[in-house]
Amino acid sequence: MSDFYIKTGTTSVPTERGYYGAFGGRFVPETIVPALEELTTEYAQAMADPAFHAELAHLQQTYTGRPTPVTFARRLTEQLGGAKIYLKREDLAHTGAHKINNALGQALLAKRMGRHRVIAETGAGQHGVASATAAALLGLECHVYMGSVDMARQQPNVFRMKLMGAEVIPVESGSKTLKDAINEAMRDWVTNVRTTFYLLGSALGPHPYPMMVRDFQSVIGVEARAQMLALAGQLPDVCIACVGGGSNAIGLFHAFRNDDSVDLIGVEAGGSGIDSGKHAARFADLNISRPGVLHGTRSYVMQDDDGQVRETHSISAGLDYPSIGPEHAYLRSLERAYYTSATDDEALAAFRTLSEMEGIIPALETAHAVAEVIKRAPTMSRDSVLLVNLSGRGDKDLDTVIKILGDRL
């Protein structure tokens, strides 16, 4: 059985009130404050209960398929001619992405709390699939909110959710994407707070969600740290992950945050280019992205002069979120993590390169991180080691990619 054991409170953040420096906190209607207080207490009790950890670890091994391996990307390394490139293979976890780590942990917590109805939001569909999967496994009722635009471009995932018994509720408001799905899920929770568990998918939202999601996803970094020492004989010089809300990245970064020799790089969605304004790169243009409150937490938010949330764009449904998890904002403020972006075209090129070089088709979200690897690896020495979190596989994105690349292949 996996020896993974979640360790909360291993850093100075968050504070008791859920703050990561100037970011985080809890900005919610009074009606759900008691639910958040209850969740915080129940989560702390679960973290202190060896039986909870044992059940989660057992399911991680026998159901999710953990530990996921680390793969040395030999051909990609040779082609780029720089740093040795390793891939943390979250694409090989059950359901095809890292999202199952958090969904399974929260679903076990919901059952522990006596909640038999769970709601979730999803953009790319992977968290919705993971939530439906965990709910089916544990016998929970599951409702997933998803923007109609995302439903159109992620039809395979919509069908997977329905196949596992979840109700997928289309959201027609706003940009009809992830931001609006979260809005509707929160409205549902406010209405049904006594009977419903909100299974939030990324490291955002009101406290304790950013901490809780980080802790459940930290298995990625815990495993990768030990695996890199065994395979490469050293810690990586650089860790890279794509960043939407930020769960896969914070899951990788957390195990390395106290290792000053390891650079942490998050890759945002550059969309059509930063100058076009059609992107979701929260840290790339601080004229339109500045501290604000969205979905119950304080972080950087893309907004207009009147403080209204700006629409975003990305070829990847999972990265077009106008804000970012508060711990990422905090790590950036400390200059402990650095954030860059990749455009749609760069992500598509990386999608194709990894497929051709390694026989691994990544999710479009993940391809943004691979794009940064392609830029960065050749600038590094051959003795350097670069680790990228392969957060998900690309089956779900084939319809999108076929429409763009089909005639070129």
Image (tube, rainbow, N blue to C red):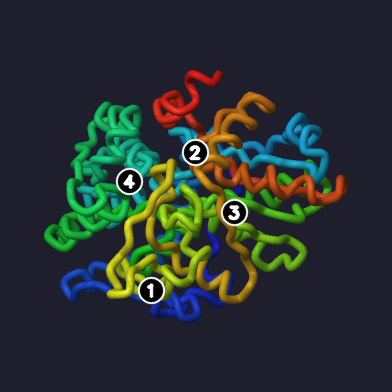
* Residue named by callout 1: 298
* Sequence-first tag of 3 and 4: 4
* Sequence-first tag of 4 and 2: 4
Please identify, in this view, whether the residue under mark 3 or under mark 2 is nearer the observer. 2
Q: Quadrant of residue 74?
A: top right
Q: Amino acid at mark 3?
A: Leu
Whole-angstrom CA distance, mark 4 to mark 1, is: 21 Å
* Sequence-first tag of 1 and 2: 1
* Residue named by callout 3: 252
* Sequence-first tag of 1 and 3: 3
* Residue named by callout 2: 364
* Residue named by callout 4: 122
Give residue 166's position: percent from left, percent from top.
23, 36
Q: Amino acid at mark 2?
A: Leu
Residue at (39% x, 65% y) in the render: 302
- What crowding class fits label 3: few (fewer than 14 Cα within 10 Å), some (14-19), or many (20 or more)? many
Give residue 64's position: percent from left, percent from top.
48, 36
Please identify, in this view, whether the residue under mark 1 or under mark 2 is nearer the observer. 2
Q: Nearer the viewer, residue 310 or 265?
A: 310
Whole-angstrom CA distance, mark 1 to mark 2, is: 27 Å
- What crowding class fits label 2: few (fewer than 14 Cα within 10 Å), some (14-19), or many (20 or more)? many
Element under disc 2: helix
Element under disc 1: strand
**Does residue 40 sit above or below 369 in this rendering?**
below
- Left or right side of 300 for 4: right
- What crowding class fits label 1: few (fewer than 14 Cα within 10 Å), some (14-19), or many (20 or more)? many
Residue at (42% x, 57% y) in the render: 277
* Sequence-first tag of 4 and 1: 4
Q: Amino acid at mark 1?
A: Arg
Please identify, in this view, whether the residue under mark 3 or under mark 4 is nearer the observer. 4
Element under disc 3: helix
